[in-house]
Image (cartoon, helix red, strand yellow):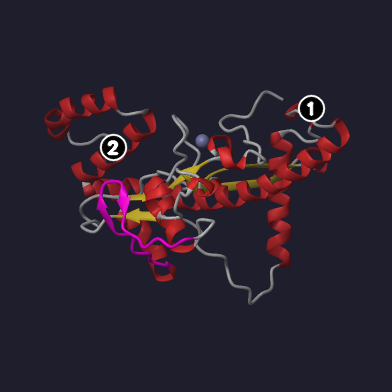
Amino acid sequence: MPAPPEVFARDEGQLLDHARILRYSDFERAIAYWEQLADPDRAERDAAALHDSRSLHLSPTFEGTWALDGVGDPIGGSIVAEVLSRIDDELFEADWAEAKARAGDAVTPSDLARTPAQRRFDALVEMARRAATAPADGKAPRPLFTVLVDYPTLSGRMCELANGTVVTPGHLVPWLSTADFERVVFDGPSRVIDVGVRRRLFSGATRRAVEVRDRFCTGFGCDEPASRCDVDHVVPYAAGGLTVQANGRVACPAHNPGRRKRRARPSGPDPPE
Ligand SMILES: [Zn+2]
């Protein structure tokens, strides 16, 4: 998606500075915003083309098996990935408990009855089963995805899914009639204004404030999205730490010392099977 050459020439130095300083995922976001600002109409056309390229093929093949492949647009793909990953987590917990009962406390991922790919397919089957058994008048769970849009935008520029994928404002329009809006007020780049109360666990608006502020695990170099993390205390509750936004942080199971009971799921590419 090249921007106009004169705009690139103007901004090249700044982009190179970003490339040197930012970590990869942040640089990717910076480039996406730069492309939107450099040529908003083109960015919307490109986004429309991405959406048009969505596809799914589920084809019967040899011996009664099915071949499944496809490409998702940023929003639709994120919705499917999020729901599938939640079910996959449930199945992983069940597999782990079963393996532990069999292999004892020394259980390792190689003791699990299913490979990650087998479990992911089973999660898809479970997703279908739940869809088929959902009551016709059932209420769809919300939110399906979270998008961060800054005040001047829809022209001036923060418009990305909570998982960090930059989307164009036009790409969101079809979703707006069914969207829930939350107002999250920042008084600086990293502080959400909220009202803290003395509670044991982060919940409700305070929890959302921390999730929307941090967005990813705050463990060093960790990219685990907030939806797969807990919100825990920086100063532990037992040591007098308050359950307020300023004392909260998003941490994945591996980076959350208070929740060691939950194992960290391996993230990133699947191990070889
Ligand atoms: Zn982490």
Counting from the top left corner in percent of width and height, residue 9 is at 13, 28
As drawn, the residue found furthest toward the right would be 102
* Quadrant, the C terminus: top right
Counting from the top left corner in percent of width and height, residue 91 is at 73, 46
At mark 2, the secondary structure is helix
Asked if the stretch drawn in magenta spans residue 140, the answer is no
As drawn, the residue found furthest toward the bottom would be 137
> Considering depth in this image, is 9 or 247 the residue closer to the camera?
247
Q: Circle 1 is placed at which residue position?
A: 106
Q: Which mark is residue 31?
A: none
Q: Amino acid at mark 1?
A: Ala
At 52% from the left and 64% from the top, the residue drawn is: 142
> Considering depth in this image, is 8 or 234 the residue closer to the camera?
234
Looking at the rendering, the stretch of residues picked out in magenta corresponds to 179-198
> Considering depth in this image, is 62 or 102 the residue closer to the camera?
102
Q: Quadrant of residue 153?
A: bottom left
- Looking at the image, is mark 2 or mark 1 nearer the viewer? 1
At 50% from the left and 53% from the top, the residue drawn is: 76
Q: Which mark is residue 30?
A: 2
Q: Answer whether residue 52 is visible to the viewer in this image.
A: no
Q: Amino acid at mark 2?
A: Ala
Q: Quadrant of residue 221?
A: top left
Asked if the stretch drawn in magenta spans residue 186, the answer is yes
* Quadrant, the N terminus: top left
Q: Answer whether residue 79 is visible to the viewer in this image.
A: yes
Q: Along the horizontal axis of the image, is 136 left or right of 257?
A: right
How far is the residue under mark 2 from the one under mark 1? 44 Å
Q: Earlier in the sequence, mark 2 or mark 1?
A: 2
Counting from the top left corner in percent of width and height, residue 44 is at 30, 50
What number of labels is visible? 2
At 80% from the left and 31% from the top, the residue drawn is: 105
Placement of 222 over or under 52, stated as above or below: above
